[in-house]
Image (cartoon, helix red, strand yellow):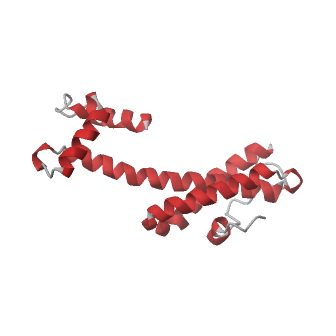
Amino acid sequence: MASTKAARVGAKSARPDLGSSYERDFYAWSHNQAHALRAQDVGSLDWENLAEEIESLGKSDRREVRSRLIVILTHLLKRQYQPTRQSRSWKLSILTQRHDLAEVLGESPSLKRLLPDLLADAYASARDLAMYEMGLNKWDTKIPPKQNPFTLEQVLDEDYLP
């Protein structure tokens, strides 16, 4: 959240309303805005900053889905390409991430339509991480393919493990 707060402050630096409590005390600002919303006090609402904060909440969920996909894919690749080194912690990590991912998607079901694109994007990062963790480089003879070998169904299936 600190980086989000820094981005908010940085984004506002060119605006004339630098003295608003949004920049001085985000916690107090958020409580004041929640109170104004509940009271339907339209005149006290900081519309621009409220809109940015609401938008950032959606982006945060999207980033969380991508991040969880990266962890799942990284461990699936490690299981597939280093079967003799499989550990219970890899399986636990996959199961935990799948469970937590399902929870995020349950709370924000509209993100499900983004899953194919997020999966494709996450795979590139997961491949790099898996190769690094396995001590592989692009010249090794047996490396994960550039195209994701796992279907979305496999990635989400709590019973699937390579």
Q: Is residue 19 left or right of residue 57?
A: left
Q: Above or below — where is 79 with respect to 7?
A: below
Q: Residue at x 25, y 34 (%)?
A: 22
Which residue occupies the extreme right position in the image?
Answer: 84
Q: Above or below — where is 151 with respect to 49?
A: below
| Residue 147, position as x, y percentages in the image | 67, 63
Q: Residue at x 20, y 50 (%)?
A: 37
| Residue 53, position as x, y percentages in the image | 32, 46
| Residue 76, position as x, y percentages in the image | 73, 58
Q: Is residue 116 left or right of residue 126?
A: left
- Which image quadrant: the C terminus? bottom right
Which residue occupies the extreme left position in the image?
Answer: 43
Q: Above or below — where is 135 with respect to 92?
A: above
Q: Is residue 79 left or right of residue 153?
A: right
The picture quadrant where one finds residue 18 is: top left
- Which image quadrant: the N terminus? top left
Q: Residue at x 72, y 53 (%)?
A: 92
| Residue 158, position as x, y percentages in the image | 68, 66
Q: Residue at x 58, y 62 (%)?
A: 119
Q: Above or below — where is 159 with respect to 128?
A: below
Q: How many marks?
A: 0
